[in-house]
């Protein structure tokens, strides 16, 4: 997309929603963290600055370089600015609210999701703009979306469509849900006859 680049780089609504993560208590849900850290808050464990190799972590454990992450965030911001892009990085791999906040603070238009559940997680952490890289015809998910858009006039949601029938199904579900705002869509074009997704013919568009 090449429009609507955010102008306020200093305050990301997502950032204020991530602070509470440091208060989470470490338990069996936290992969690879030291068993003897059970009951500590995430913030308290992080403050101990334990050695990755001698601090009791179990393997496999994923470690990120803070310097490399910051470098990549800065590089992406520079690239998007240089080319006038409204960039929505995909969040499905990391599902990390802290990373989302960093991307938004550096000018990302929003965050991309693959499925509705991911969009629900994004909303829980204050993401105000979501691009769903999929067609959304699930009536239950559309009812949730209608509620989110009604409750928050500033919330922006965009998704793919690849057929007229898909738009009709969306319209029916949103109408039944009492949607008060339209949902913006982008027509996904299939790349050739064997394309996995996207509209294949002009009639589909």
Image (cartoon, rainbow, N blue to C red):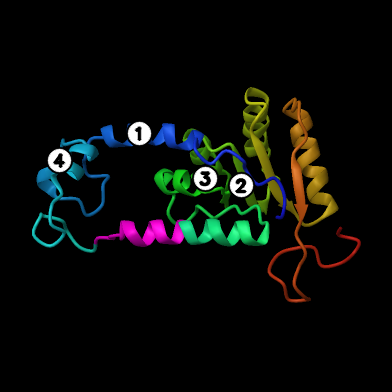
As measured in the structure, the alpha-carbon distance from the residue carrying label 4 to the one carrying label 3 is: 32 Å
Within 10 Å of the Cα at label 4, are there few (<14), some (14-19), or many (20+) other Cα atoms?
some
Residue at image point 75% right, 63% down? 198
As measured in the structure, the alpha-carbon distance from the residue carrying label 1 to the one carrying label 2 is: 22 Å
Assign the N terminus to one quadrant of the image.
Answer: bottom right
User: Which residues lie in the magenta part?
Assistant: 61-73
Majority secondary structure of the magenta segment? Answer: helix
Left or right, 134 with respect to 174, comes to: left
Q: Name the residue under label 2.
A: 109
Residue at image point 39% right, 56% down? 70
Secondary structure type for disc 1: helix
As measured in the structure, the alpha-carbon distance from the residue carrying label 3 to the one carrying label 1 is: 16 Å
Residue 69 lies in the magenta stretch: yes
Q: Earlier in the sequence, mark 3 or mark 1?
A: 1
Q: Name the residue under label 1.
A: 19
Secondary structure type for disc 4: loop
As measured in the structure, the alpha-carbon distance from the residue carrying label 4 to the one carrying label 1 is: 20 Å
**Residue in front for this viewpoint, 137 or 109:** 109
Q: Name the residue under label 4.
A: 38
Secondary structure type for disc 3: helix
Image location of residue 120, percent across then percent down: 53, 38
* Number of the label disc, if any, that sits on residue 86: none
Image location of residue 40, percent across then percent down: 16, 36
């Amino acid at each position: 997309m090449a429009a609507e680049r955010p102008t306020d780089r200093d305050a990301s609504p997502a950032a204020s929603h991530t602070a509470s993560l440091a208060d989470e208590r470490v338990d069996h849900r936290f992969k690879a963290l030291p068993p003897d850290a059970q009951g500590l808050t995430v913030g308290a464990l992080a403050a101990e600055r334990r050695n990755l190799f001698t601090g009791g972590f179990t393997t496999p454990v994923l470690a990120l370089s803070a310097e490399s992450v910051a470098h990549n965030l800065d590089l992406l911001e520079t690239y998007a600015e240089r080319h006038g892009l409204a960039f929505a990085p995909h969040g499905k791999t990391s599902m990390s609210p802290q990373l989302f906040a960093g991307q938004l603070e550096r000018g990302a238009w929003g965050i991309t999701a693959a499925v509705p559940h991911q969009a629900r997680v994004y909303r829980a952490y204050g993401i105000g703009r979501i691009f769903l890289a999929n067609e959304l015809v699930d009536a239950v998910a559309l009812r949730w979306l209608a509620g989110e858009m009604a409750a928050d006039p500033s919330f922006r949601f965009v998704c793919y469509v690849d057929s007229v029938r898909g738009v009709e199904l969306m319209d029916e579900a949103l109408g039944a849900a009492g949607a008060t705002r339209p949902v913006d869509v982008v027509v996904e074009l299939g790349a050739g006859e064997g394309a996995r997704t996207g509209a294949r013919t002009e009639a589909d568009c």
